Image (cartoon, coloured by chain):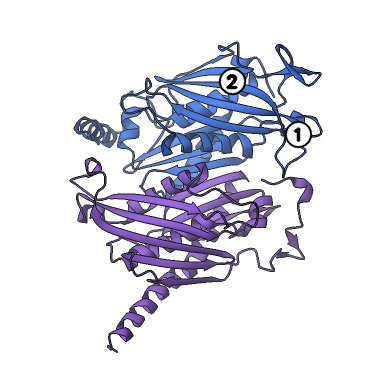
Chain colours: A purple, B blue
Amino acid sequence: MASLANKPDLIVNGKRIDGRDFDELRPIKIEAGMLKNADGSAYVEWGNNKILAGVYGPKEVFPRHMADPAKAIIKCRYTMAPFSSLAEHGRTGPNRRAIEISKVTKEVFENVVMLNEFPNSEIDIFIEVLQGDGGTRAAGITAASVALANAGIYMRDLVYAVSAGRIEDKIVLDFNMIEDNYSEADMPIAVAPRNNEILLLQMDGGLTREQLKQAIGMVLEAGKKISAMQKEALNENYRKVAEQYGQK
Amino acid sequence: MEAIDIIKSNYIRELLTNGVREDARGPNDFRGVSIKPGIIEHAEGSAQVDLGATKVLAGVKLVMGEPMADTPDQGTISMAAELLPLASAEYETGPPSPQSIELARVVDRGIRAGNCVDLADLLVAEGKAWSVFVDLYILNYAGNLFDASELAVMSALMNTKVPKYEDDKVVREERIKDIKLDNIVTSATFAKIGDHVLLDMNRNEENAADARLTVATDGSAVRAMQKGLSGGISVKEIDDMVGIALAKHGELKNLMEKATKRSL
């Protein structure tokens, strides 16, 4: 959290600092399949976030001794580019924060990917934050889901993620960076929409039991919109491929 | 997973179908807790916590440093966890594993979000402030490192004394006051095994777990949460776990206050 001395008014006349309502998502644009080498890919613009996800696999496990004869293993690497933040130049490669995010993200996809279909193989998920403006892990997971589907990897569900939290006494959806820095609580959540199971949940700040329920409810509601955008991105990619090969 | 782990996991699941835990505890019972504060005299604060057979040592060192650029009015706190190779056969030497990084960061979030340490009070002069280094040493792994570590860190902080600082020098031999604390946070970690939810999993229960949720609270609000493992959790289950975590806070807080002879 940044110093409270510089804290701006996050809520003015019932609107948020960027003019949104409390339960309003930032503008989201999702595109599937723009990387030719990757088996699957997706690009997400989520507010000022610009995030690229690429998937390779299923392929042979490296190193070999990590192979599981019963199922595929998933590797996940979330990183922020050194130029991605409005603040100082960052360091290349994953820091401690990124290693933790990579771990919990991997666990999300271990749930939905049908690992038993690909014994002895590995699936690599790369999430590159090119520009970060709050909520990058949620946007990254949303992008990686689309990339996995774009790679044709069997999944039980198309996961989405978004954060909710608290500003003053208001429960608020999808923080931008300034809100993230000065909010009273922040809680990224990833959901499998078919049964609304929570696959990722992290939180810090302060929420009562009631506020927590309200925040999760807000996420589940917004998730319907995110899910629709993910599906539309995949459909759009199929239409493009069909056009390319002259099929209507 | 090794064959023996699978066999033990199946055993845990089979017991649960009859509503029984391996060590005969109720679903919402902690194992026995022992807190020994101040066992490392050289550290400004320390505590060893045993949670059943899980043993965790937390040490606190204070170093005179500079505030961070974006918080010039505060000292700093940072946390690291070492899964020592002597703590379990599967722990190996080398750079910090994702598991140890997650552990340290989750414990850190609870303490930080709970505003436990008064960081402003660590400022000594303009541009001079104490940096608090908390190191978690995992001595024996027998399940649920999260709650044992949260207790160890919180107890070590309650045991921490600030050294004298005079003529631009830290006088380590003289400790002038307790570190200023504003809140006490405890955590409760749950394992979901099939449809069963268990507080404070032992080693075999952790092996069998589909999902894990850590809830750190100060008794009135939730301060930090972390879900782990690949299984899903329903919204209802999360709410139940939060309720139990809030209810368990007082019991753990009392244990720490009694052991460290310091209360807030």
Residue sitting at 41 percent across and 74 percent down? A233
Let me know if residue A244 appears in the view.
yes
Please tell me whether mark 1 sits on a helix, a strand or a loop.
Answer: helix
The residue pinned by badge 2 equals B256
Residue A182 spot, x, y in % from top left: 69, 51
Residue B122 figure quarter? top right
Looking at the image, residue A17 sits to the left or right of residue B81; the answer is right
Say which residue appears at 37% left-offset and 56% top-offset.
A125
In the foreground, A123 or B120: A123
Image location (x, y in percent) of residue B174: 73, 11
Quarter the C terminus of chain A occupies: bottom left
Judging by the rendered image, the residue that carries numbered circle 1 is: B120
Label of residue B27 in the image: none
Residue visible at 60% across and 10% down in the picture: B41
B37, above or below B229, in the image: above
| Residue A54 x %, y % | 38, 61
Going by the numbered disc 2, the residue's amino acid type is Met
Name which residue type carries label 1. Answer: Ala
Q: Quick check: B240 above or below A230?
A: above
